[in-house]
């Protein structure tokens, strides 16, 4: 199975096909995500991050895996362990090995180590260690370089200011060295994308309409030559994503948008099925109308 997702990512990268990765902030979101991908003949990922578990209702990597096994058809959806931070958004040290071992033991198709809050050297050292550990199980690894802000407590600088200054953007020189030294399979980069807030009142707010610096992305593509990942897909303006797909973007994480739709509907109707329908509807809209990737499964198979 892990081999399959590795191949799909490689093919998607070569063909310029986007693989959407949907975060399950609640176990009940898993069925509508899996069903919709299959219905639309689209390959995507179901993923769960530590913040989904700690700050929302995803419960645990094990619970999410069990739900995935119930509803996910591996031809259409793989399961990815998103964000296992070494240092988390609250500046706490995380026992990342234990969390990775949990996912690898269960049979997650891919995992992510996030050492982006470390120095470059430390990020390389730890990512390399995780790559060795995961590759023993033929499991690909995603890592992060640069600062995809937004998960932190407290205010972040105004978006335009951040974007124009390029502060926190992944540096091409660092990326080249990072990929070479670690052997990582996919790289999450920062080129203007930001995470949705996970704490406080802001977690219910609509995200800013983020932009991407496409020239910067091209530089990263040229030096890394591996599939690139964007976190914080919700809220990035569509034309930027479509342009990014032509320039090395292969996996797009979509979390905030679908979580908010689920939570809002549940608050209003107190009906899980209705909230699940809202998730299905949004996932379908994103696949068909927004990113235009309906039928990507057949495209990747050929
Ligand atoms: Zn992320």
Image (cartoon, helix red, strand yellow):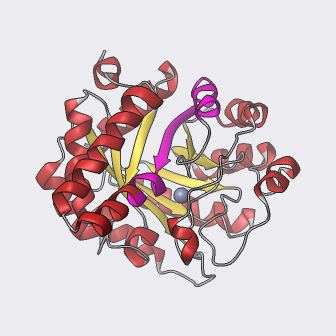
Residue 123 location, quadrant? bottom right
> In this picture, which residue range is highlighted in magenta?
238-260
In the rendering, at what x and y percent does residue 73 appear?
Answer: 17, 41
Residue 99 location, quadrant? bottom left
Query: Residue furthest toward the right?
Result: 165
Q: Quick check: is 255 in the magenta stretch? A: yes
Residue 93 location, quadrant? bottom right
Quadrant of the frame with the N terminus: top left
Query: Residue furthest toward the left?
Result: 70
Q: Quick check: is 101 in the magenta stretch? A: no
Q: Nearer the viewer, residue 281 or 38?
A: 281
Which of the four quarters of the rendered structure image does ligand 1 lie in? Answer: bottom right
Q: Is residue 76 visible?
A: no
Q: Residue at x 18, y 46 (%)?
A: 72
Q: Nearer the viewer, residue 252 or 258?
A: 258
In the rendering, at what x and y percent does residue 137 appear?
Answer: 32, 54
């Amino acid at each position: 199975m892990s081999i399959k997702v590795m191949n799909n990512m490689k093919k998607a990268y070569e063909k310029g096909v986007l693989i959407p990765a949907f975060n399950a902030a609640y176990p009940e979101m898993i069925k509508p995500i899996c069903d919709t991908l299959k219905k639309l003949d689209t390959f995507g990922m179901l993923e769960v991050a530590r913040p989904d578990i700690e700050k929302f209702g995803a419960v645990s990597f094990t619970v999410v895996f069990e739900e995935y096994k119930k509803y996910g058809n591996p031809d259409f959806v793989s399961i990815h362990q998103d964000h296992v931070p070494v240092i988390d958004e609250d500046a706490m040290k995380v026992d990342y090995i234990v969390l990775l071992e949990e996912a690898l033991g269960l049979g997650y198709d891919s995992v992510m180590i996030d050492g982006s809050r470390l120095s470059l050297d430390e990020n390389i050292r730890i990512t390399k260690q995780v790559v060795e550990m995961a590759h023993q199980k033929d499991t690909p690894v995603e890592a992060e370089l640069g600062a995809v802000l937004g998960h932190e407590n407290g205010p972040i600088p105004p978006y335009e200011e951040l974007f124009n200054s390029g502060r926190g953007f992944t540096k091409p020189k660092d990326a080249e060295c990072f990929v070479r030294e670690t052997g990582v399979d996919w790289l999450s980069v920062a080129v203007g994308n930001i995470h949705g807030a996970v704490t406080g009142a802001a977690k219910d707010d609509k995200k800013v309409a983020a932009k991407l610096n496409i020239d910067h992305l091209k530089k990263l593509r040229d030096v890394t030559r591996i599939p690139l990942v964007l976190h914080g897909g919700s809220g990035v303006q569509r034309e930027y994503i479509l342009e990014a797909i032509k320039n090395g973007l292969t996996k797009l994480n979509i979390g905030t948008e679908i979580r908010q739709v689920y939570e809002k509907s549940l608050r209003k109707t107190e009906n899980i099925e209705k909230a699940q329908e809202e998730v299905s509807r949004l996932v379908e809209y994103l696949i068909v109308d927004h990113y235009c990737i309906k039928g990507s499964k057949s495209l990747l198979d050929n």
